[in-house]
């Protein structure tokens, strides 16, 4: 009954879903493409057995990369099908994996749409990344006896309270999973309280990502274009944060500073450019930079490029992790630690609560309460090369110490699959 009511609610929302795609398409035209896939219609059938992995957007896609490497080594005769919900996630999949995997959109959670998806690809098993709990999708896998693992699972207190409003629906969905690989003990406890079974703590897959050498080389080239200026990076900023940062910069400027701002979503690049221009700051876009030296008069570099975050970290002296200044729960701080750049975090870190606590405890990160405090602490760090070096080394050690989640997740998956007969390639 709970899932029936949920499905009826989705039906009522169908006009809004279509309008939402059109509205998103005004800012990012890729949302106007492949609508058929969003309702379970796919053109190409694969002649080999399929491993299905769902990664909603960019962060989940990147986090899955080390696990995908292990999956392809373990089952080389299988084809990996990635499903996404956002064009940026799909683009990240193309950038990371090229033609070695298939990329399609996951259909919306209408029973007939997910049934078409599942019967079209017939995956031998599926892996859902992090918190993508779609009741009809999970029920369909259970009906077709497709083992489904929730990997790199996280459940913040905020999300747990929201899911707890629908206890019967969530319990049914979670019990349809073959197993859950949780990031932390706290995540495991919350998921278990909501109804999940066979929950194992495997760690965070994002620790297994290593900076690509070509990205570090690009970062060194970008750093060379800055002519020895102090560089402060605002990484993966979210709506509303850039205005606060720019105002704080004007209120307490740092001598000779180059500020790099990299918005989280590409559809906001032009919006952020307008924010910078409205404050009378001199800036250049990354897309216009090529290999030109950055003028000493240039105050801001707008990172309007995709797939270069490791390079931006490598080019900076100090990095602030976006999504943490306002109540977004923070973007991924682990990549910055893996590069060895000192970190600053805002007050909102619930998406990476354990990683943020551990990074602060080991000295790799410091937390600030506001944009004004951010620039005060950044100025302190930029004056103290020794402190930056110690923080960066602490970040490197922190990232190395927590690796291994991909192997543990694979071990859990193999235990689950030992109970079933997989199709042969």
Image (cartoon, helix red, strand yellow):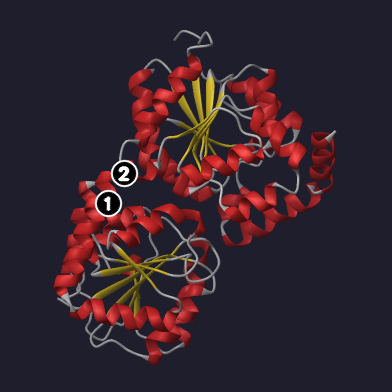
Q: Is residue 208 above or below residue 383?
A: above
Q: Quadrant of residue 393?
A: bottom left
Residue 418: assigned label: none
Question: Can residue 294 be seen in this snapshot?
Answer: yes
Residue depicted at x 80% and y 40%: 6
- Expressed as whole percent of the image width and height from the top left, the position of residue 317 reads 23, 70
Left/right of residue 206 with respect to residue 112 in the rendered view: left
> Tags 1 and 2 in contact by the CB under 8 Å rule?
yes
Question: Can residue 68 be seen in this snapshot?
Answer: no
- For label 2, the residue is 402
Q: Which residue is nearer to you in this view: 278 or 162?
A: 162
Left/right of residue 204 with respect to residue 400 in the rendered view: right
- Expressed as whole percent of the image width and height from the top left, the position of residue 388 reads 20, 69
Q: Is residue 117 above or below residue 156?
A: above
- For label 1, the residue is 398
Residue depicted at x 38% and y 32%: 67
Quadrant that contains the N terminus: top right
Residue depicted at x 59% and y 40%: 191
Residue depicted at x 25% and y 62%: 341
- Cα distance between the residues tagged 1 and 2: 7 Å
Q: Is residue 243 above or below residue 332?
A: below
Disc 1 is placed on an element classified as helix
- Expressed as whole percent of the image width and height from the top left, the position of residue 279 reads 45, 88
Quadrant that contains the C terminus: top left
Q: Which residue is nearer to you in this view: 243 or 149?
A: 149
Disc 2 is placed on an element classified as loop
Q: Which residue is nearer to you in this view: 48 or 381?
A: 381
């Amino acid at each position: 009954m709970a899932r029936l009511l949920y499905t009826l609610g989705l039906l009522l929302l169908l006009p809004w879903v279509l309008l939402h795609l059109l509205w998103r398409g005004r800012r990012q035209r890729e949302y106007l493409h492949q609508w058929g896939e969003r309702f379970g219609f796919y053109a190409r059938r694969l002649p080999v057995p399929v491993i299905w992995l769902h990664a909603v957007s960019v962060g989940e896609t990147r986090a899955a990369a080390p696990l995908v490497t292990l999956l392809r080594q373990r089952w080389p005769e299988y084809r990996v099908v990635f499903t996404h919900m956002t064009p940026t996630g799909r683009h990240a999949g193309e950038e990371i994996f090229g033609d070695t995997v298939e990329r399609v959109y996951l259909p919306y959670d209408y029973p007939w749409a997910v049934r078409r998806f599942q019967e079209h690809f017939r995956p031998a098993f599926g892996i859902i990344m992090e918190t993508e709990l779609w009741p009809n999708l999970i029920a369909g896998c259970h009906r077709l006896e497709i083992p489904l693992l929730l990997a790199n699972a996280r459940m913040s207190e905020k999300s747990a309270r929201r899911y707890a409003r629908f206890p019967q629906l969530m319990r049914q969905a979670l019990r349809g999973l073959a197993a859950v690989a949780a990031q932390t003990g706290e995540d495991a406890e919350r998921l278990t309280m909501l109804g999940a079974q066979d929950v194992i703590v495997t760690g965070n897959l994002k620790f297994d990502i290593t900076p690509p050498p070509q990205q570090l080389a690009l970062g060194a080239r970008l750093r060379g274009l800055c002519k020895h200026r102090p560089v402060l990076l605002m990484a993966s900023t979210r709506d509303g944060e850039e205005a606060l940062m720019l105002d704080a910069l004007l209120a307490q400027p740092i001598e000779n500073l180059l500020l790099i701002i990299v918005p989280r979503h590409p559809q906001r690049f032009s919006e952020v450019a307008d924010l910078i221009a409205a404050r009378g700051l001199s800036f250049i876009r990354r897309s216009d930079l090529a290999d030109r030296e950055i003028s000493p008069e240039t105050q801001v570099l707008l990172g309007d490029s995709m797939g270069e975050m490791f390079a931006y970290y490598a080019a900076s002296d100090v990095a602030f992790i976006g999504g943490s200044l306002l109540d977004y729960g923070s973007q991924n701080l682990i990549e910055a630690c893996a590069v060895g750049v000192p970190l600053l975090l805002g007050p909102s870190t619930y998406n990476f609560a354990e990683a943020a606590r551990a990074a602060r405890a080991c000295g790799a990160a410091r937390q600030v309460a506001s944009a004004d405090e951010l620039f005060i602490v950044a100025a302190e760090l930029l004056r103290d090369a020794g402190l930056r070096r110690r923080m960066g080394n602490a970040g490197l050690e922190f990232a190395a110490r927590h690796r291994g989640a991909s192997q543990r997740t694979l071990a859990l998956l193999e235990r689950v699959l030992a109970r079933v007969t997989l199709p042969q390639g």
